Image (cartoon, rainbow, N blue to C red):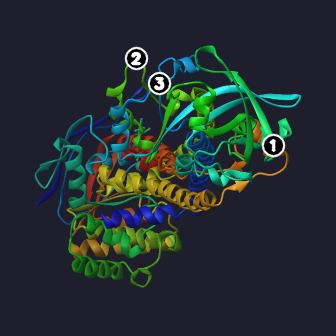
Amino acid sequence: MFKYFKIAWRNLWRNSRRTIITSSSVFFGVFFACFMTSMQRGSFENMIGNMARFYSGYIQIQHPDHKETPSLNNSLLLSTELEEAISKNNDITHYQKRLETFALASNGEKSFPAIIFGINPQKEDKKSSLSSKVEKGKYLENNENALMIGKVLAKNLNINIGDSLILFGQGYHGVSAVNLYRVGAILDMPVPELNKSLIYMNLPDCQEYCSVNGQITSVVLMVKNTNKIKSVEASLKPFENENTKIYTWDELMPEILNLIEGKESSSAMVKSLLFMIIGFGVWATIIMLMHERKRELAVMIAIGFQKTALIFMMLIESFLIGILGILGGLGVSYGILYYLYKNPITVVGEMAETYRSMGFEPKIMFSISPEIFYNPAITVFVIFLLVSLYQIFFVAKLKVSTSIKS
Amino acid sequence: MNVIEIKNLTKIYNSSEVQVKAVNGISIDFKEGEFTAVVGPSGSGKTTFLNMLGGLDRPTSGDVIIGGVNIWQLSSRKLIDFRKNNIGFVFQSYNLIPVLTAGENVEFIMQLQGKPRKERDIRTKELLEAVGIGERIKARPSKLSGGQQQRVAVARALASKPEFILADEPTANLDSTSTTSLLELMSQMNKKYNTTFIFATHDQRVMDKARRIVTIEDGKILSDEYFDRD
Ligand SMILES: Nc1ncnc2c1ncn2[C@@H]1O[C@H](COP(=O)(O)OP(=O)(O)OP(=O)(O)O)[C@@H](O)[C@H]1O
Ligand SMILES: [Mg+2]
């Protein structure tokens, strides 16, 4: 065993420039793929995380028609059995009842559409640390009759802390809903869409404003981690009925999922192209290497080297080329990406605006999910497996008598 | 005692239109300790003959029996093992594994045979000293002259203690001094270890050393003569 490894190792450095160039191409391929995927995943994970935290939750319970027609007529009363099941489930870290409605917010001449969330401020803060987003004013107390509004909306309405705001909307069964509220806090949300339209108030106030009787539009659930979503969903499914339906975040935000899938498939194409180029490069190297050694291999077989042993030896060499590239690429990528994951890059200036307008937080976030690293590693491994088929074929077909003459 | 028995050996190449009978029904025996030159004009079939004899090129018909084994009836794996244990090869050039030192090249074949470390070390030293390369045991082939490389190749061929050694034009790439000394060496080894040598050659100096000369023409034996030399 060791004797083959020794020859393979020395063969590897026989043409060290070629080995280094080939390994480097693998290295850069792996690095580039990891970097690109990590950056993309990072921004998606961040976006999903923010949306889930501040808006949709990872799982929501709604009236089955609310998604299609988000009116108060499609609201629900949370059954005690379901609430009990939720509070007993250890994978659910937070849940909160919410009443969601639309209204026109106006201040003097200015009016803008707004989405109103009736919440429990204390619970909400535990769930999403919403109080840390307060830019001006004071975070809402439970039972305090005031509003917290997104900073862009506040700016558009030209409104400040302590000012009053009128909400015009439609309550339960079409009654008109109008009321005057004091602005208690201005929020800077990490989801640009929410900054433009968001208003929070206490759930009882909101229920009163909408003239509902204890109904809510949704229960928002947070889970321990994203891979618990499916099991939690399954455990709540039995409670579904004509008034109650369980949704997961991807059903609630199909636009985001589409966006992600679109971006990922285009980047998958770039990556395939990249690995195709690398694959051909590696293949060309191996073809060259095998042909250069043709005579030498024939001599080895002549003096008593089994072809299987020879194949084994050649495969060690080509896999070493691959492994050097893969491990180098993974090591360097992980190091750099881990740093960037811990220290995301803040985007400033015009770029920041572009980010916001596309619905992203103006931060370049990175992800270090394991599949970011093992996918390119597996791809490169497969490339080398395919190339090794060529090597096996080459040695198996090698005719000693004619090759020695060459 | 016959080391090699060859019966009605034939090799026909079917290249495009013409059929070439490279070896055309050769029957001959080789005895232990013989030092034989196979000679003949270019294209007469020497290489083809030696390759069939050494288990490298499959005959169209006929038998090669070495130490009682009909080698062309072995499976290809068995045939490779048979070569490893019974036949030494010296080719025209580039015989050695370039990434192994002279010593490792000689030792390697014994490693393939599964010989113990100690025995390998002793025999490697002994053989390289016998072929006059003892000083260069740690040198890679590229650092050795053509003549020195051929000497190492002879040492390697001897290392496995084969029944016989086949050498196809071993001196073709050597200058006259190296040719003379390589021949001297092979003849010494032949006497010292009583190993059978069969070599194909054009070289008059090689023929002058041979104790048996087999002349081939058009794939047939033209003459088979023995000489006394000392
Ligand atoms: N692979 C092959 N395919 C077709 N014909 C071949 C092949 N190998 C050899 N021949 C033919 O067989 C005949 C004998 O060739 P061989 O190489 O055995 O001669 P040789 O005596 O060794 O010649 P030289 O002294 O030039 O080395 C020649 O006519 C050659 O052209
Ligand atoms: Mg020849």
**Count the marks: how many?**
3
Say which amino acid is labelled 2.
Glu
Question: At which x and y percent is residue B136?
Answer: 44, 81
Spatial separation of the CA atoms under disc 1 and disc 3: 33 Å
Question: At which x and y percent is residue B207?
Answer: 37, 62
Label at residue A76: 3
Of label 1 and label 3, which has the lower sequence position?
A: 3
Q: Is residue B21 above or below residue A341?
A: above
The yes-or-no answer for disc 3 within 8 Å of ligand 1 is no
Whether residue B98 can be seen here: no
Spatial separation of the CA atoms under disc 2 and disc 3: 10 Å
Q: Residue furthest bottom?
A: B135
Of label 2 and label 3, which has the lower sequence position?
A: 3
Using the image, name the chain to which the residue with label 3 belongs: A
Q: Quadrant of the N terminus of chain A?
A: bottom left
Using the image, name the chain to which the residue with label 1 belongs: A
Q: Is residue A140 above or below residue A330?
A: above
- The label nearer to you, 1 versus 2, is 1
Question: At which x and y percent is residue A33?
Answer: 59, 46
Q: Are marks 2 and 3 on the same chain?
A: yes
Question: At which x and y percent is residue B70?
Answer: 15, 46
Whether residue B33 can be seen here: yes
Label at residue B153: none
Q: Secondary structure at mark 3?
A: loop
Determine which residue is flagged by label 1. A163
Proximity of marks 2 and 3: CB atoms separated by less than 8 Å: no
Say which amino acid is labelled 1.
Asp
Label at residue A242: 2
Q: Secondary structure at mark 2?
A: loop
Residue at the (35%, 53%) spot, across then down? A312
